[in-house]
Amino acid sequence: MTTARFDVIGLGNAIVDVIARADDGFLAQHGIAKGGMTLIDAHRAKVLEDALADTTIVPGGSAANTIAGIASLGGEGAFIGRVHADWLGEGFAAGTQKIGVHYDTPAATEGAPTARSVILVTPDGQRSMNTYLGASVEMDEGDIDAAAIGAAKILYVEGYLWDTDRLKGAVRKAVAAAKAAGRLVALTLSDAFCVGRFRAEFIELIETDIDIVFANEAEITSLYETEIFDEAFQNARATGKLFAITRSEKGAVICQGAAVHLIDAIPGVTVVDTTGAGDQFAAGFLYGVAHGLGLAVSGRLGVLAAGEVISHIGPRPIVSLKDLAAGLI
Amino acid sequence: MTTARFDVIGLGNAIVDVIARADDGFLAQHGIAKGGMTLIDAHRAKVLEDALADTTIVPGGSAANTIAGIASLGGEGAFIGRVHADWLGEGFAAGTQKIGVHYDTPAATEGAPTARSVILVTPDGQRSMNTYLGASVEMDEGDIDAAAIGAAKILYVEGYLWDTDRLKGAVRKAVAAAKAAGRLVALTLSDAFCVGRFRAEFIELIETDIDIVFANEAEITSLYETEIFDEAFQNARATGKLFAITRSEKGAVICQGAAVHLIDAIPGVTVVDTTGAGDQFAAGFLYGVAHGLGLAVSGRLGVLAAGEVISHIGPRPIVSLKDLAAGLI
């Protein structure tokens, strides 16, 4: 194993967030399910964008958000994900590189436009997401930079990528590259519905190739088909793999074989927007693991980063996580 | 080890609760700290009782409440604690025996009157406790029925009993009787202030004589002098003893060596009065241990019993815990 250039390399859907304030009337007029995440097509994305006067456009996407958190902690991050060669794709690349993240997946010149999520924030602070996956789900093996993956201590993969065979081919190549270089492979289960669709594959993959699993309560209980958290926890422990399970206001549970750590959530945080909580928890935890800080400190970095991101709108930190974590890192 | 006649025998302060509704004006007039537990003398207890028109008088006391929970679960419970031969003492004995608990500690004919806690419930549901310990703290070795202790699977002792040397003598005799009979000894840390006073003694006792420790978050973090729950949890695990740690709305953590169980609180409970939550958690958990139901089910019995008692005024169950736990026991 050679020296690692990166702490973590993320593999995920490259999505641009188009954030706008809207009232309940706008949601009703456009038939948008409040608080939900709905997949939409290109036409509908354009209709929504045209109807919105004032939008904020920022790079998003689950694994990409995590890598942004790694950078905010002062770590070295890289990201692989496909955009299209359009102005949103250019914005995603520029915004990603600006924060110090290594990103050079070539923008596609054919196929669908760049993925975007039109996020409507209502006056009550709720957000409703309308996601067009576009170019991101057209990523394939050709986009996988095996050398970059071999140069990262940890490969971090979104469960969302199991949705198409083409993406799965890209994941397989990435995992093989990490394994060949003796690196760790981390998986986030991403979404309880996602777990429902790919339960058997995820369970087998965890047994074979995965070293670190991220899940929230809904995802881990779905994975092991139980309503009782403790039963899911016992199943996770029995694998011997490293699990980091987030439990909202109950904090996080870290386990690996005999080791179990119970990490409290940061107290006194006013929750403005929980989007990105899981992504930033993963950022803090993976930073800790990559830097050999131990499971307890890694868990505390996770809840610290999650506590920052839920205190404001948007899925990425707005203050330096490195400053916030002074004393821990 | 012979067949056990009792599941659990409790050793604690025998206290009668004198519960009355009062308004904030009454508290102010009598200089009572709202929401607190204040130790008072016999004179002050009489003044308060005389000033209250309408009181409900019921048996209380931490370990005694736990044994009442054991009985409500259909288990066999016994209690040791000293009352005085006065009408409150007779009421304590009659009320304890009525629910099927074995209780025959002789009522003292000399010394202080029966202990009582004057509990004032304000219209906002808060309760303020004013406790006169009276005869309960005059318990001594002579009150310890070694044969009854030897006939119980588990001896359960209140940390409150460390407050006087006389009580400690009684505890020592009781623990020796349990050990001689090959029984389990359980300790509740009772109160964070209590832990602060007897930290070194408790830590040594846990290493030597105790098999099962009950604590809440404030008590366990005080015991191990840390503000970080996970650090206290690691210290508890390192002892190898069985710990049952309650965390209010976060549920309970059970650990013993390699085993760790994370038990969720009962969802959807409207909290009316948290007094007795720890006592009833201990009842459910000890019932499960005494009946060999395993740590996970024992923990679930604990949160079930705690969830019942916090949904109403008073520190003992008002419905049959046995019926409530159908399916688990």
Image (cartoon, coloured by chain):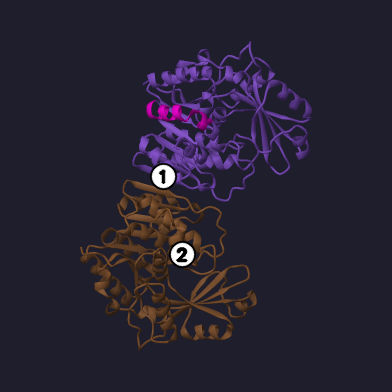
Chain colours: A brown, B purple
Marker disc for residue B100: none
Picture quadrant of residue B54? top right
Type of amino acid at the residue the image marks with label 1? His
Foreground label between 2 and 1: 2
The answer to if B199 sits in the magenta stretch is yes
x%, y% of residue A260?
A: 37, 47
Number of numbered labels in the structure image: 2
x%, y% of residue A38?
A: 50, 74
A93 vs A238: above or below: below
Chain of residue at mark 2: A
Crowd around label 1: few <14 · some 14–19 · many ≥20 (10 Å) = many
Residue linked to disc 1:
B261
Asked whether, in this view, residue B43 is left or right of residue A235, the answer is right
Crowd around label 2: few <14 · some 14–19 · many ≥20 (10 Å) = some
**Of residues B269 and B278, which is closer to you in this image?**
B278
Asked whether, in this view, residue A268 is left or right of residue B117, the answer is left
Residue linked to disc 2:
A320
x%, y% of residue B131?
A: 65, 27
Identify the residue at image location x=36%, y=55%: A243
Identify the residue at image location x=49%, y=17%: B169
**Of residues B268 and B112, which is closer to you in this image?**
B112
A112 vs B326: above or below: below
Stretch in magenta: B194-208
